[in-house]
Image: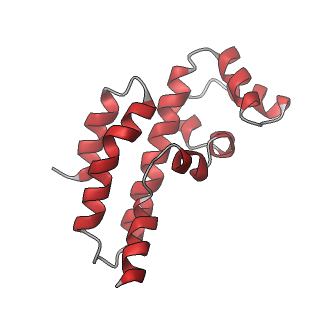
Amino acid sequence: MPLRRRLQHLFADAAQWRAYVGFGHPKLRGWVNYFRISEVKGVFEALDQWIRRRLRNIIWRQWKRPWTRWKRLMQRGLDETCASRSGYNGRGPWWNSGASHMNRAFPKRYFGGCGLVSLLDEVLKFQCAL
């Protein structure tokens, strides 16, 4: 079974996305170790982007109401007008998880600080060591 499909099964039960980060960490690291000699940068980069977008999607769905979304986006550092426009935009969770306001509120370094393994960074680290 491909990695992305396995991760989708993990995400389906992810009530708490932080639990996924802790549970999915060994799977991601093992997958990177298996394919570390590969020289295909694009695949790892696309998977990294998809994983972070899926986590942002889970966060957006947990915020359920527009007012909560507006309040949480402001707590994450967005200005009031941008947070209001984003929280009340009426678009779906997948669209919002890929939008610039969620990328600014939850950048790559945020998920790295929570313990998420970046596939591309791990592969590049292995290739530099060889």
Give left or right: position of 31 versus 11. Answer: left
Give left or right: position of 2 versus 70. Answer: left
Tell me the residue at 45%/33% (across/down).
Answer: 18
Most distant residue in the left direction: 1
Tell me the residue at 47%/53% (across/down).
Answer: 49
Give left or right: position of 78 versus 101. Answer: right
Residue 92: percent from left, percent from top: 54, 28
Q: Is residue 29 placed above or below 55 in the rendered structure?
A: below
Residue 93: percent from left, percent from top: 52, 30
Quadrant in which residue 23 is drawn? top left
Q: Is residue 109 placed above or below 61 in the rendered structure?
A: below
Q: How many marks?
A: 0
Quadrant in which residue 64 is drawn? top right
Residue 90: percent from left, percent from top: 63, 23
> Which quarter of the figure is the C terminus placed in?
bottom left
Q: Is residue 21 placed above or below 126 in the rendered structure?
A: above
Tell me the residue at 55%/38% (across/down).
Answer: 97
Give left or right: position of 61 versus 25. Answer: right
For the residue pair 66 and 10, the one nearer the viewer reads as 10
Residue 109 visible here: yes
